[in-house]
């Protein structure tokens, strides 16, 4: 990262971390609290015949006891992961259909579902998989896809262009039918796609209503958590309500996917995903060999202390990313545990979820851009990094992850960031902005207007329990009567506009700034009280018009960069989103049983096994012995 994009002035950095916590009262608030909703540890002694895995952190390398009639696979051929669930139990048991209401790919099931293309943000590589190639027509209203000959579903049925067209047309059908429960991607696909047709067994054509130059990347490529699940026509063709179909029967081989794994047992406490006997990719020579991992055993998330102890004791191979203070202890207590950056700071990698203050731009004090800018000037990002994250973080001035594909857009933004310095801590400039908005300080040093203080909560998920209290205290010291809280219904509150300032990530841009910038177009606007997908409720007609033009162009177009900079200047001037930090995945990866994890020295993909790129990790892992 360019140093000038990672610097911000500091306030009184002679104050130590301990002094800051003591002076602000944050030590008692638990700034190093663990992630929201992490359930308690599993019972150390599971009930008889329950099949529950014991979280016995004193046992060393013992694998959890097998559930039901599953094959006997040794620990050294088993990958044990911990992710998901609620209160120590999985809530999606039996939902083999990826489009079923409540289903998730994040708990190992991504091993079953292969895309047309993968994308690795770290190598900026678009990897053909079930497809061999694709091509747009000149105006990006038509996309032709060539599928890979020889690909097969797990029941032996050939995978063809019919499956691609069927999946797209199913999403169109479901999204357009008000009587059907919507499924993942169905709403936008039904708006964008006219139809998908089949030319021959290996050629599908998707016709759009308007130019869609990003569709192959945004929807037909698996990267992080995004991408359409391609489903088998011969299984789903007679299913009207796709969301209601559960699609799991281990004995009959459901779910049917194209990946090399199958689900063999599944309870609320354990999920067994075993290697199949054959796989089209090996049979056709597309890959050289079957994965070395013979079993994936998924366990529901425990509290952070328990998870840390289990991976230290070699009872887990990988798990949900840990907070900054925890991961330091984990890598220090087991020589075999590494992170993306080994045992060196920042002990992780940049995820696609950069953190910002989001604002309700339609109601309350933060509807005024001067107040939003005052917030940005008041917070000291560098001090936040030192105090809350023990120095193991990366700051950002833009709401994009700094990946190779986005580097040109960071570089082009440098002149604008000199004019609109979103990383600057400057209390004098904050005061000027507040005065312009009609505020003055009362006798206790808080900003007031017409006799009313800006008195509110800063909402956030539990993963912000480290930085949230520190930022809130900085704002209080700067005159904002704010308190960091993690409401149980936080997601509903921000969707309906009942919170006015909150911490959140983005999950948008990866190699093109469009996806994140599109979140702030007025098409997502809904009045307060009505849920909406992206929650800023920002409206600017000039911004919308530029974004409409950007939507028609690929990022490689000669005019695209100019449009980006025009839109970015409006964004920075209005600041509907106040960038703070890059989100880091601090994922422990245990080399006791498995090696060749993705790292900074071997960055074939990001290391989050809960993402749709999990199959790429499974292809690379090798036994340690």
Image (tube, rainbow, N blue to C red):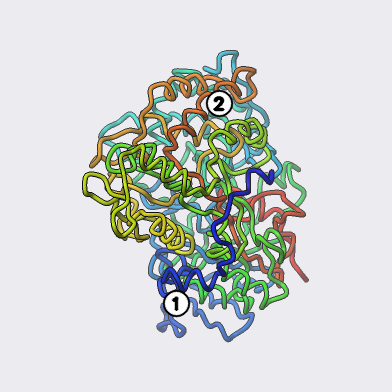
Q: Residue furthest top?
A: 138
Residue 149 visible in the current orientation? no
* Residue 414, horizontal then vertical, whole percent: 63, 34
Q: How many numbered marks have been drawn onto this rendered protein structure?
A: 2
Quadrant in the picture for residue 411 = top right
Residue 600 sits in quarter: bottom right
Closer-to-camera residue (194/67): 194
The residue wearing badge 2 is: 564
Residue 271 seen in the current view:
yes
Residue at horizontal 30%, vertical 31%? 177
Label 1: how many Cα within 10 Å (few below 14, some 14–19, many 20+): many
Label 2, secondary structure: give it.
helix
Q: Quadrant of the C terminus?
A: bottom right
Dot 2, how many residues are within 10 Å of its Cα: few (below 14), some (14-19), or many (20+)? many
Decide if residue 495 is on the left or right side of residue 271: left
Residue 76, image x and y in percent?
69, 72
On screen, residue 565 versus residue 528, left or right, reads right
Q: Is residue 300 above or below residue 600?
A: below
- Residue 444 placement (x, y as % from top left): 31, 60
Q: Tell us which disc is closer to us: 2 or 1.
A: 2
Q: Earlier in the sequence, mark 2 or mark 1?
A: 1
Vertical side of 395 occupied by 239: above or below:
above
- Left or right, 455 with respect to 212, comes to left
Q: Is residue 366 left or right of residue 20?
A: left
Q: Which mark is residue 42?
A: 1
- Cα separation between marks 2 and 1: 49 Å
| Callouts 2 and 1 close, C-beta under 8 Å | no
Q: Residue furthest front?
A: 443
Give residue 189's position: percent from left, percent from top.
43, 30
């Amino acid at each position: 990262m360019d140093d000038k994009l990672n610097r911000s002035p500091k306030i009184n950095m002679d104050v130590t971390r301990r002094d800051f916590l003591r002076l602000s009262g944050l030590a008692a608030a638990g700034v190093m609290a663990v992630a929201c909703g992490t359930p308690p540890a599993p019972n150390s002694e599971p009930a008889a015949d329950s099949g529950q895995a014991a979280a016995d952190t004193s046992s060393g390398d013992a694998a959890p006891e097998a559930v039901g009639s599953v094959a006997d696979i040794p620990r050294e051929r088993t990958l044990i992961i911990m992710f998901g669930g609620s209160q120590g139990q999985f809530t999606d048991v039996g939902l083999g259909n990826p489009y079923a209401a409540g289903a998730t790919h994040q708990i190992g099931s991504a091993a079953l579902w292969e895309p047309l293309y993968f994308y690795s943000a770290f190598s900026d590589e678009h990897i053909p998989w079930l497809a061999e190639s694709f091509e747009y027509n000149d105006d990006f209203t038509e996309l032709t896809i060539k599928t890979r000959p020889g690909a097969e579903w797990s029941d032996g049925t050939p995978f063809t262009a019919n499956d691609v067209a069927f999946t797209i047309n199913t999403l169109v059908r479901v999204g357009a039918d008000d009587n059907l429960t919507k499924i993942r991607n169905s709403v936008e696909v039904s708006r964008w796609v006219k139809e998908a047709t089949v030319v021959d067994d290996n050629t599908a054509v998707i016709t759009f209503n308007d130019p869609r130059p990003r569709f192959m990347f945004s929807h037909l490529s698996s990267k992080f958590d995004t991408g359409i699940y391609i489903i088998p026509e011969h299984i789903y063709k007679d299913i009207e309500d796709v969301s209601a179909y559960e699609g799991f029967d281990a004995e009959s081989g459901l779910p049917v996917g194209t990946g090399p794994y199958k689900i063999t047992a599944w309870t609320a406490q354990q999920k067994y995903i075993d290697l199949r006997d054959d796989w089209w990719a090996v049979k056709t020579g597309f890959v050289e060999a079957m994965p070395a991992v013979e079993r994936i055993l998924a366990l529901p998330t425990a509290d952070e202390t328990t998870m840390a102890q289990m991976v230290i004791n070699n009872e887990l191979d990988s798990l949900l990313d840990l907070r900054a203070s925890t991961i330091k202890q984990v890598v220090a207590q087991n020589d075999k545990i590494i992170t993306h950056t080994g045992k060196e700071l920042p002990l992780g990698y940049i995820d696609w979820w950069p953190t910002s203050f989001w604002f309700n731009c339609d109601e309350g004090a933060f509807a005024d851009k001067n107040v939003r800018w005052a917030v940005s000037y008041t917070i000291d990002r560098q001090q936040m990094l030192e105090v809350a994250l023990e120095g193991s973080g990366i700051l950002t001035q833009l709401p994009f992850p700094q990946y190779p594909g986005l580097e040109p857009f960071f570089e082009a933004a440098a002149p604008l960031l000199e004019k609109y310095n979103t990383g600057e801590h400057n209390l004098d400039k904050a005061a000027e902005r507040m005065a312009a908005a009609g505020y003055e300080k009362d006798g206790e040093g808080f900003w007031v207007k017409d006799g009313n203080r800006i008195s509110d909560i800063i909402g956030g998920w539990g993963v912000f329990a480290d930085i949230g209290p520190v930022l809130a205290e900085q704002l209080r010291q700067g005159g904002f009567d704010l308190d960091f809280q993690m409401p149980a219904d936080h997601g509903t509150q921000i969707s309906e506009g009942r919170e006015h300032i909150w911490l959140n990530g983005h999950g948008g841009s990866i190699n093109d700034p469009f996806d994140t910038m599109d979140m702030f177009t007025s098409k997502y606007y809904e009045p307060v009280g009505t849920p909406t997908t992206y929650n800023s409720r920002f409206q600017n007609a000039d911004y919308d018009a530029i974004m409409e033009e950007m939507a028609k162009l690929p990022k490689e177009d000669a005019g695209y960069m100019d449009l980006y900079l025009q839109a970015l200047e409006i964004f920075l001037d209005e600041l509907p989103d106040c960038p703070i930090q890059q989100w880091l995945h601090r994922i422990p990866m245990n080399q006791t049983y498995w090696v060749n994890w993705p790292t900074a020295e071997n960055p074939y993909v990001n290391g989050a096994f809960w993402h749709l790129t999990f199959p790429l990790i499974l292809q690379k892992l090798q036994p340690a012995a």
